[in-house]
Amino acid sequence: MQWETVIGLEVHVQLATKTKIFSGASTAFGAAPNTQACAIDLAMPGTLPVPNGEAFRFAVMFGLAIDAEIGTRSMFERKNYFYPDLPKGYQTTQLEAPIVGAGHVEIQLADGSSKSIRIHHAHLEEDAGKSLHEDFHGMSGIDLNRAGTPLIEIVSEPDMRNAEEAVAFARKLHSIVTSLGICDGDMSQGSMRFDVNISVRPKGQEEFGTRTETKNLNSFKFMEDAIKLEVERQIDLIEDGGKVIQETRLYNGDTRTARSMRSKEEANDYRYFPCPDLLPVIIDEDYIEAIRQDLPELPDARQHRFAKEYGLSEYDAGLIAADAATAHFFEECAKACGDAKLSANWIMGDLAAKLNAAELTIQQSPVSGALLAGLIARIKDNTISNKIAKQVFEAMFNGEGDADAIIEAKGLKQMSDTGELEKIIDEVIAANPAMVEDWLSSEEDKRKKKMGGFMGPIMKATKGQANPGMANQLLEKKLREKL
Amino acid sequence: MHKLTIAELIQGLRNKDFSSVELTRHYLDRINRLDASYNSYVTVTEEIALQQAAAADARLAAGDAPALCGVPIAHKDIFCTEGVRTSCGSKMLDNFVPPYNATIVENYLRDGAVMLGKVNMDEFAMGSSNETSYYGPVKNPWDTNCVPGGSSGGSAAAVAAHLAPGATASDTGGSIRQPASLCGLTGIKPTYGRVSRWGMIAFASSLDQAGVLTRTAEDAAIMLNSMTSFDDKDSTCVDEPLSDYTASLNEPLKGLRIGMPEQYFGEGLNPETSDRVHAAIAEFEKLGATVKSISLPHSALSVPAYYVIAPAECSANLSRFDGVRYGHRCDNPKDLEDLYKRSRGEGFGEEVKRRILVGTYALSAGYYDAYYRKAQQVRRLIKQDFVDAFAEVDVVMGPTATSPAFAFGSKGDDPVAMYLEDIYTIATNLAGLPGLSIPCGLVDNKPVGLQIIGNYFSEAKLLNVAHQFQQVTDFHQLTAPGIE
């Protein structure tokens, strides 16, 4: 039987506000446990929440970015459950009147097609603390630094049909929130976390199958793996005559396996009700309009601008424009060196590979946009070849200085002195009589290709510094003289 | 000195008839000697009181001290006091010492009032008789076999026994006004949002409001002046201009339109209580007020609506008491569930558990619409009743409680009988309106109260109405038998 997968996402995005959603405590990551939790975050008796206006501004920015209706009268509910990292015994969240209503996000797929994914709504809520189950000798540790960090939870419609679409959607959301500057996008620190709802149904059937929810995926790779694994599990289960049960599952990225966490029957009754400590939040049109006017450039607009302004292909422009930091890096580099295409190639190629291997973000890159531009300028003015450029880039990445300093220090300047190069070519021709004989006896249309055989020894003799174009020209001239 | 009202104490301190230290020592001495009979104090803060009194004397000597400077008061043990155990009448918080002050505590500190101690209350303010306190019941100074009312029973008994000239209190369904009625005091619950809830341990957040218990309306006005402030730490606090509640006390009542809700004088009201209330209202007519009968058609629904909304909110508000961060923790929990079950099972008393269960039930999947949502709809109807009434009258008057103080244990086995104790007071909390109770006579040698309900933010008017009544009557000057 042919199966169709149906995927919907719930995405938790930590907002980059300085303080928490209902208290004045700092949201900075990495402090010693429980040093960034005030009386409100600890749910001390008698304390009360006061909403953080910045969190609302960020949520409205997101709403405008996905073309959604903004909830002009939004409310908070209490979601009740007991857990030690949830100090109040309830999470303050939004249910009936969320701040962001229905919207949509466009995704591009590898085959060049695009698709619109509908957003059901996005709401503001507070994050919980962290439970630490290791190193406490049979007990658990609680760190409440994260408790009260503002989140928006983005809930999609079940519009995705495979892992590729889900990942493209997740990446697009990442791109939007980082472009808006409302989230640092650092997934390794939990700034974005994905819950994936997955079901399968026979192709052509309208009714959805029973879904499972795989919770708390914190990388695109894990998400892709977890979806593939779960789709396979569900199809195998049904084809073997079994039934998918509604449950929450946990994926382990280390073992690449998933397990059931709890079934629907074991689920909490959250007993939502309006939080009596918080009044409805009224957002007026002027406020929304002011935010709309100040909205930073969004990834789609940036992509089109890069294609138009810098002459990049839409595909390249899309890759470069997706991440705000990468886009900024690109513009700095392209403007400084005057070659957008080369800038894009270097950023997506060598730079991306090096950063990836070193597990660095582009903000942490030891090679800045200006430094890379300096390197590209030396390629364009033929001071160095592409091959040498890679060597210079490597040195730049290791912090050995700018391109000119490295070229100078390592003596990597391209050999463009005709006399010296001629001498070396003569030596190579003299040392390889068999190759010369072969070239001379070849058909004319094969000769060009066969010249390549001489380039290795020439580059070796010049330590790679020969200007390839010039060397080629001289070599051909010398060989033709022998005809 | 303990016979003097707050207004008189303020005068005495300024006239140097006595110092704040002398006054404070006098009250501490009374508490030490006499409170064993009433059990009104949970904690006496002798050392702090004497330090604050000495500081107040210095401010008074320097001149320009705020009105309450040097006047001793007691705080209900629901208000967080920095460095002083705040138990909320519960074993759960028997060991809880807050690192912060409630805003109202801070306001009294600012004005130089002296804290004598923390007074008893029903556990987490849940009760109408002060019998649910972990620290034992409070006795009514008028008759120590009877309850003082609740939940602010400790505040009421302390003031009635002259163990404090005034006390802070809180009112979720009548917890200031009903004890005022049963102990012969003046008690006011301001408009919801008038007084900051920061640092007041929550029972039902949409209903809780702090207020005061004093012997006279003038004293209540003075205490309320210090208590009210706009507080950005409480999102439900309303940024209304502050009034000087003493400024309008002497305005004449000629032309005051009084409404008597027919529903407040029906079945269940003690006939003698009814007589005293009618007589009091007749007194207002002598002062130039007009009286008409009005209807609050949804009154009968206020108790059922309240006993869905208040428990629902409390079921969430009390979830934080889980034995993890502060408060009671059971010995040797074997796992997380055991920690929760035993810490909460041991830390909470019966009435608190009952309300958590009721509230949890009312919010459960499948019941929410039938209970919680319905109760909120009823709440809007009740509020509308008052909005309609205040289109025709300036104040609403009726009994505060159905009868005078009842004997200990007489309603103990029947929670519904106890819940009906607040039948006349609950509607004002549901509507968020201010309400006040003043003594209007004795029945069986025990006080009964007249309740006066006003429109939103009409506290000054309520106090003016009460004060004018107290200018022509002496019910507020009656003292419980046996008070020296």
Image: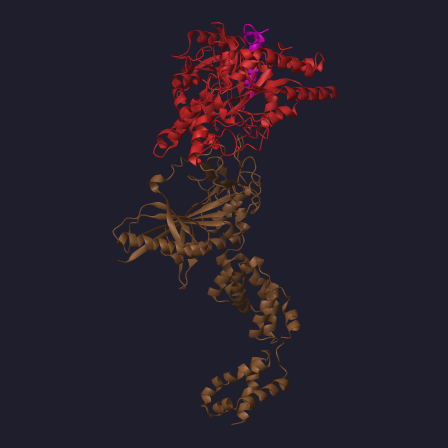
Chain colours: A brown, B red
Nearer to me, B240 or B368: B368
Q: Residue at x 49, y 24 (%)?
A: B91
Residue B446, percent across and down?
A: 49, 7
Q: Quadrant of the N terminus of chain A?
A: bottom left
Is residue A205 in sight in this rendering? no
* Residue range (magenta): B456-484
Is residue A62 in sight in this rendering? yes
Q: Is residue A51 above or below residue A438?
A: above
Q: Is residue B202 above or below residue B44?
A: below
Q: Is residue B440 above or below residue A435?
A: above
Q: Residue at x 27, y 50 (%)?
A: A242
Hey, which residue is sitting farthest right in the picture?
B62
Q: Residue at x 53, y 45 (%)?
A: A57
Residue B69, percent across and down?
A: 67, 20
- Magenta span includes B375: no
Hey, which residue is sitting farthest left in the picture?
A241
Residue B430, percent across and down?
A: 45, 25
Nearer to me, B452 or B252: B452
Residue B266, percent across and down?
A: 39, 13
Q: Is residue A44 above or below residue A161?
A: above
- Magenta span includes B460: yes
Q: Residue at x 47, y 5 (%)?
A: B444
Nearer to me, B230 or B153: B153
Q: Quadrant of residue A457?
A: bottom right
